[in-house]
């Protein structure tokens, strides 16, 4: 049952939409180059990504069709569904490189952990917006958000997918800090977090994960292993120089020196082929989109809208920053994609749905109370 | 749950505007956070792409471009007439590229059957390569024949990682001709690699190991080319980017005459003679023949000589490894009498008409010094003394001149010092003096030793080249030329880079008359009725020469034995040195036959054959003319 206010069309955020389209077009062009020369079997990644992008557009339309505040309600079945999928993936998932992350849906492999990020944003936004606390939240109020986070966190860590699991923690911290805690809650939280980190280093992290972090601190130590990836990525980006080697002319990517060149390291290909000014142009548009998202939060009509918009921006922002810092040799290889740019259906769909929510918040910025419903009913 | 259901939603819309505003203020902080990270990322991009861009560009190129050498064709070696002695041909090597083969074990098993080589040898080659990068080919078998080549090429699917490498290899058109002078190539050794320019040589390269191939390495080697290939991260070749063609080496034309050299070598070889044959142009110093027998078997050296072959060469009592032209020293024997005669005439102790009496021996101190002719020559003048090689005559001349002045003239004729010829390990020989003996032996010179010296025995030691030089100097009237082996060096376009110029090293001035008198005696050696080398005579050609016998041991126990009963290694060496035509000498030929016993009859025929070949056209012409006059 669609209840759409006419003002919604009027208030549709064309700026955000065009920024998204611009980023997506450049990302698809880059993906074509990153998977060039074309493989002889199967569907080339850029075609797949095109289809998924169109699917995501339909998903955005769907998200726009209802008022975002209904997510207060849909949040719960959605959360339950994701948890079920995460459990399922541990038993029936497709494994690749020693990790079980996917559920094969036939036409595409779903990675529930990607959706879990968005799920956490919505759940926390719903919780914090409903519960207001004078002078910040105390420890008692933190029990629910922590539980909401820790359940999918542990399931994803079990796969194992350290990068995505850490993303959940980052989303939790961002939104919680944004919602504000009391001082003692911060202190306890930091103590617990630090303790968990130490515990994780000694008992939870796999040797290869530790190696990645060690390699970052001393990349010369292991040039053919983890350090090799970072080094080759730095060579790719650095050799782009001022204006790059030209589209489809990058050698680091096409000669396979660059690992994972259409997934995690896709932006290295862009850097190599378009150079410093090309990366400036692309990232300029990319981060304008995120800043515009913050503006959307600023203009939201209610607390839920603010939290949702903020959460979506942080979800994309942190992934982008971590991915870029990894590509540029500042962070270990943790397997975080660059949203919209890296190949990967689940990530793309999640990102587009998240942006759909952002558009929804922005579109309904002038509606107050249940006025929208009243109008549409009337 | 309290929040489910539509009704409750209304409650949350009754929000607190002040709280909402403070929340929105914090959004500005989030904006600042984003801008901070964006600045950090841009700064990093600037550092990588602008500041270090050039460096990373180079690293990206080094990543993808693999350079490999293209061997340059080595320069050819020609004889004086432009005949090709040594050139190149394509040779096909079977090489293994380890990165392209995933089952080397099986591959080698199959390959060893096809190549008919023991598998352990193939493994040995791979072991030798050690931890060289896996994309660098390892030579498994060099210079395979056509059938093997065709089989491997046709069945390349069965041999992943095996390729055929084509490189230039040496072809010796005249077999082992002048092998000692020309030398051979071999794979560069670790020691050579260390001492040479790394930009020119690499492991596996061929390099001149001996002879002119070694001495003229710089001229012959040319410049390697480079092939630039793009490779991917796995090392697989993607495409050829460009080839820089190699620059072929320079050609070297020798002064040697292949035909003459062949005559000399063949004759020596056919009679299994060990020794040396040397011929030079007396008025220029061009070397025409530089033969050392037994010859060096060059084919044993291609691709590295085996232990067994090397030991066989080492243990051969005829010493094929030594270039006897310059590296072996012998007493000059009676050939030295030219010097004694020259010293006698020049110092005036005798003249051409001085007659000395030979009773078959000469008493000096309390010893008797014998003439080779026990019965004695009777009264001899210079001409007879030379032609019949009377020892007693020269004993007396030597005594009158004194050993130091003998050495002085020996030096003038090229003995006792290196000639400077462009060959390796030249020996300087010994022209003894009183001073020399004191220094080397620590004892005073005995006058009796002057007698031995005067007839070319005693401490005297010479190389065959020196005797040839001496003969040439006598023949040309006193000029000692630098013996040279290179006629010219030309670059691949035919441009002459260096050309032969005669060089006079030393000259005996004002002695033309005396030299002519000596030459009269030398002509008599060959042409005279009682000359010691009558057998060398050639109809229509006047030859001047001198025989010589170089004592190997002075053991009296062998003196009384018949010649054939003396053990080979104790037999005397045989010399014959000559020049022709006597009227206006052009060529000097020297032959030494190790343990050959008789200069005239053993060494002489070899020299004769060389002269016949050298003058063949003129002799034929003269014969025709003679025929005509007879017919009239």
Image (spheres, coloured by chain):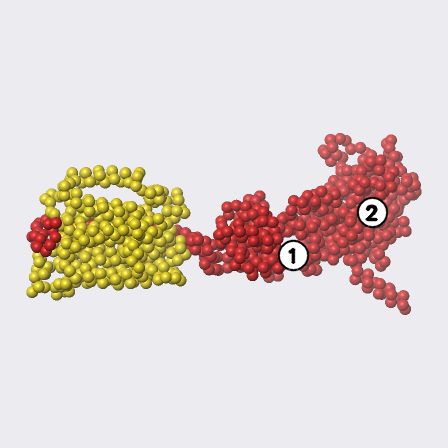
Chain colours: A yellow, B red
Q: Nearer the viewer, mark 1 or mark 2?
A: 1
In-front residue for pair B625/A230 = A230
Mark 2 belongs to chain: B
Who's the residue at 80% across and 61% down the image? B618
Q: Which type of secondary structure does the marked residue at label 2 adopt?
A: helix
Left or right, B456 with respect to B254, comes to right
Left or right, B391 with respect to B414, comes to right
* Residue located beneath label 2 in the image: B599
**Earlier residue among tags 1 and 2:** 1
Left or right, A46 with respect to A137, comes to right
Q: Quadrant of the C terminus of chain B?
A: bottom right
Q: CA distance from mark 1 to mark 2?
A: 36 Å
- Choose top left, top right, bottom left or bottom right for residue A353: bottom left
Image location of residue A201, percent across then percent down: 30, 40
Image location of residue B109, percent across then percent down: 56, 51
Image location of residue A129, percent across then percent down: 13, 50
Q: Residues within 10 Å of mark 1 (few under 14, many from 20)?
A: some
In-front residue for pair B267/B55 = B267
Q: Residues within 10 Å of mark 2 (few under 14, many from 20)?
A: many
Label drawn at residue B430: none
Instruction: State the count of labels.
Output: 2
Image location of residue A26, percent across then percent down: 29, 61
Q: Which type of secondary structure does the marked residue at label 1 adopt?
A: strand
Who's the residue at 87% across and 67% down the image? B628
Who's the residue at 33% across and 43% down the image? A206
Note whether residue B150 is visible: yes
- Choose top left, top right, bottom left or bottom right for residue B80: bottom right
Mark 1 belongs to chain: B
Note whether residue A325 is visible: no
In-front residue for pair B16/A68 = A68
* Residue located beneath label 1 in the image: B171
């Amino acid at each position: 049952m669609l209840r759409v206010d006419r003002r919604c069309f009027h208030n549709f955020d064309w700026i955000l939409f065009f920024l998204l389209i611009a980023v997506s077009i450049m990302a698809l062009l880059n993906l074509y180059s990153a998977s060039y020369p074309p493989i002889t079997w199967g569907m080339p990644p850029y075609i797949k990504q095109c289809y998924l992008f169109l699917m995501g557009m339909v998903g955005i339309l769907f998200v726009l069709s209802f008022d975002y505040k209904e997510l207060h309600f849909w949040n719960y079945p959605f959360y339950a569904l994701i948890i079920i999928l995460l459990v399922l993936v541990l038993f029936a998932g497709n494994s690749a490189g020693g990790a079980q992350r996917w559920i094969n849906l036939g036409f595409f492999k779903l990675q529930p952990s990607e959706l879990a990020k968005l799920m956490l944003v919505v759940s926390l936004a719903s919780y914090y917006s409903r519960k207001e606390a004078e002078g910040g939240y105390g420890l008692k109020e933190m029990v629910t958000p922590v539980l909401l986070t820790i359940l999918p966190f542990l399931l994803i860590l079990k796969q194992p997918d350290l990068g995505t699991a850490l993303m959940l923690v980052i989303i939790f911290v961002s939104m919680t800090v944004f919602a504000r805690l009391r001082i003692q809650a911060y202190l306890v939280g930091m103590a617990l977090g630090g303790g968990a980190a130490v515990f994780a280093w000694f008992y939870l992290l796999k040797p290869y994960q530790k190696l990645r972090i060690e390699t970052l601190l001393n990349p010369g130590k292991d040039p053919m292993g983890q350090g090799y990836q970072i080094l080759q990525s730095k060579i790719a980006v650095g050799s782009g120089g001022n204006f790059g080697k030209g589209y489809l002319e990058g050698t680091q990517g096409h000669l396979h020196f660059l690992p994972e060149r259409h997934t995690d390291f896709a932006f290295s290909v862009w850097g190599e082929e378009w150079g410093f000014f090309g990366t400036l142009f692309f990232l300029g548009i990319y981060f304008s989109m995120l800043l515009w998202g913050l503006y959307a939060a600023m203009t939201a009509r209610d607390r839920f809208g603010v939290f949702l918009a903020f959460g979506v921006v942080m979800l994309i922002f942190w992934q982008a920053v971590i991915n870029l810092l990894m590509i540029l040799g500042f962070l270990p290889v943790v397997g975080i994609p660059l949203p919209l740019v890296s190949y990967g259906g689940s990530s793309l769909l999640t990102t587009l749905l998240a942006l759909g929510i952002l558009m929804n918040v922005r579109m309904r910025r002038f509606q107050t109370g249940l006025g929208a419903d009243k109008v549409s009913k009337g | 749950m309290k929040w489910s259901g539509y009704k409750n939603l209304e409650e949350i819309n009754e929000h607190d505007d002040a709280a909402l505003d403070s929340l929105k203020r914090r959004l500005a902080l989030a904006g600042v956070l984003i801008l901070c990270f964006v600045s950090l990322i841009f700064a990093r991009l600037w550092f990588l792409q602008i500041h270090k861009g050039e460096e990373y560009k180079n690293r990206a190129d080094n990543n993808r471009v693999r350079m490999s050498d293209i061997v340059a064709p080595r320069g050819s070696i020609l004889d004086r007439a432009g005949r090709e002695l040594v050139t190149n041909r394509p040779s096909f090597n079977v090489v293994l590229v380890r990165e392209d083969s995933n089952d080397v074990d099986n591959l080698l098993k199959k390959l060893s059957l096809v190549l008919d080589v023991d598998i352990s040898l193939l493994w040995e080659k791979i072991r030798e390569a050690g931890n060289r990068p896996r994309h660098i080919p390892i030579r498994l078998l060099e210079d395979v024949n056509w059938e093997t080549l065709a089989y491997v090429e046709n069945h390349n699917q069965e041999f992943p990682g095996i390729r055929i490498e084509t490189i230039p290899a040496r072809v010796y058109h005249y077999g082992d001709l002048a092998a000692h002078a020309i030398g051979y190539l071999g794979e560069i050794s670790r020691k050579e690699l260390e001492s040479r320019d790394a930009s020119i040589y690499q492991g596996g390269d061929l390099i001149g190991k001996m002879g002119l191939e070694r001495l003229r390495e710089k001229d012959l080697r040319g410049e390697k080319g480079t092939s630039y290939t793009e490779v991917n991260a796995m090392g697989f070749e993607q495409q050829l980017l460009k080839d820089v063609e190699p620059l072929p080496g320079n050609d070297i034309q020798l002064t040697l005459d292949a035909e003459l050299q062949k005559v000399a070598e063949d004759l020596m070889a056919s009679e299994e003679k060990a020794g040396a044959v040397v011929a030079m142009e007396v008025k220029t110093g061009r070397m025409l023949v530089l033969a050392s027998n037994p010859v060096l078997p060059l084919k044993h050296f291609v691709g590295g000589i085996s232990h067994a072959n090397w030991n066989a060469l080492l243990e051969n009592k005829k010493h094929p490894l030594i270039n006897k032209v310059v590296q072996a020293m012998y007493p000059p024997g009676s050939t030295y009498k030219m010097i004694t005669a020259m010293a006698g005439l020049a110092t005036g102790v005798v003249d051409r008409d001085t007659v000395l009496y030979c009773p078959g021996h000469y008493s000096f101190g309390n010893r008797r010094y014998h003439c080779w002719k026990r019965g004695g020559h009777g009264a001899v003048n210079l001409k007879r003394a030379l032609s019949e090689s009377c020892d007693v005559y020269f004993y007396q001349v030597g005594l009158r001149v004194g050993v130091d002045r003998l050495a002085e003239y020996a030096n003038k004729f090229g003995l006792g010092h290196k000639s400077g010829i462009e060959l390796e390990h030249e020996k300087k020989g010994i022209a003894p003096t009183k001073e020399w003996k004191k220094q080397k032996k620590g004892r005073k010179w005995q006058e009796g030793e002057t007698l031995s010296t005067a007839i070319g025995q005693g401490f005297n030691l010479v190389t065959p080249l020196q005797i040839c030089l001496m003969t040439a100097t006598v023949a040309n009237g006193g000029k000692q030329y630098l013996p040279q082996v290179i006629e010219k060096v030309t670059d691949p376009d035919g441009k002459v880079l260096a050309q032969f110029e005669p060089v006079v090293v030393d000259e005996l001035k004002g002695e033309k008359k005396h030299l002519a008198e000596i030459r009269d005696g030398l002509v008599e050696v060959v042409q005279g009725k009682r000359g010691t080398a009558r057998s060398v005579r050639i109809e229509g050609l006047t030859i001047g020469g001198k025989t010589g016998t170089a004592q190997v041991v002075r053991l009296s126990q062998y003196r009384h034995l018949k010649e054939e009963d003396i053990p080979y290694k104790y037999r005397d060496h045989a010399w014959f040195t000559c020049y022709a035509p006597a009227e206006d000498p052009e060529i000097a030929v020297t032959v030494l036959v190790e343990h050959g016993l008789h200069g005239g009859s053993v060494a002489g025929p070899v020299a004769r054959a060389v002269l016949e070949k050298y003058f063949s056209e003129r002799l034929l012409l003269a014969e025709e003319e003679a025929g005509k006059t007879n017919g009239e």
